[in-house]
Image (cartoon, grey):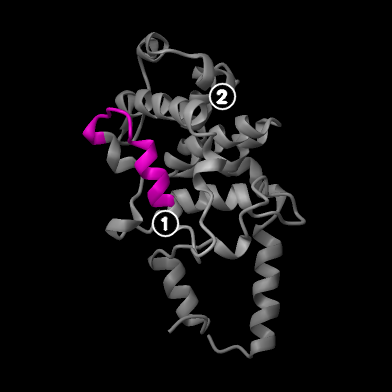
Amino acid sequence: MELSTNDLRVFLDEKAQQYNHPKFINSDPIQIPKRFHNKADIEIAAFLSAIIAWGNRKSIITSASKLMTIMGEQPYDYIINSSESDWKAIDKFVHRTFNIIDLRYCLKSLQNIYINHGGLHEIFLPKLDEEFMDSAICRFRNLFFECDHPKRTSKHIANPAKGSAAKRIHMFLRWMVRKDINGVDFGLWTDIPKSKLSCPLDVHTGNIARKLGLLK
């Protein structure tokens, strides 16, 4: 596909308007945090929805909705006030390879993050000399697993230091940081520059980018 610079700009602007549109919210996992208005509720709902965001969108939305039901549709209140006995009482949850063991630890870790580290926003803040978010993701991951944790759960939180593209975490960060006129992403974390966000490529998006001449 050979396009002039102007034609390419027009084409990409059209696609951005087509897909970065509120009409897609109801078929996308972002609909889960869109249920909430409190900042911490949105952060927690978005994070949990993002880390299970693999497979088809319908199953992701179904599983993320079950997570919100488990937390009584009050994610922040549940994270702050629940206890290990509450987590053990959750007798059933599975989304592909993410199971009840992983969920119980995620709840425990999020409680630690919000009570002892100022919340997700605070621990994702990049340092001034960091061009992109990979180092911040690595710091977050270290804190996420500072509690005694099952080894199996570590595979569910990507590690850029070991070459992971961390697509799901980057998606979560886009939701939190990017503010756009169409109201799709939340733009809650205004102290993180949008220029630090990344869009990891998979095979399909990489191939399309090369065909459009965006990448070599």
Front position among marks 2 and 1: 1
Q: How would you rate the neighbour count of disc 1 (Cα within 10 Å): few for under 14, some for 14-19, many for 20 or more?
A: some
Q: Secondary structure at mark 1?
A: helix
Residue 11 image-quadrant placement? bottom right
The residue that label 1 is drawn on is 135
Q: Is residue 112 visible?
A: yes
- Whole-percent x, y for residue 193 in the image: 62, 60
Bounds of the magenta segment: 137-152
Q: Secondary structure at mark 2?
A: helix
Q: Residue at x 65, y 58 (%)?
A: 19
**Residue lying furthest right in this view?**
181
Q: In this picture, is 63 found above or below 87?
A: below
Q: In this picture, is 106 found above or below 70?
A: below
Q: How would you rate the neighbour count of disc 2 (Cα within 10 Å): few for under 14, some for 14-19, many for 20 or more?
A: many
Residue 42 image-quadrant placement? top right
Q: Who comes first in sequence, dot 2 or dot 1?
A: 2
Side of 150 relative to 131 (left or right)? left
Predominant secondary structure in magenta?
helix
- Whole-percent x, y for residue 127 in the image: 51, 57
In this orientation, which residue lies closer to the viewer: 191 or 102? 191
The residue that label 2 is drawn on is 75
**Magenta stretch encompasses residue 155:** no
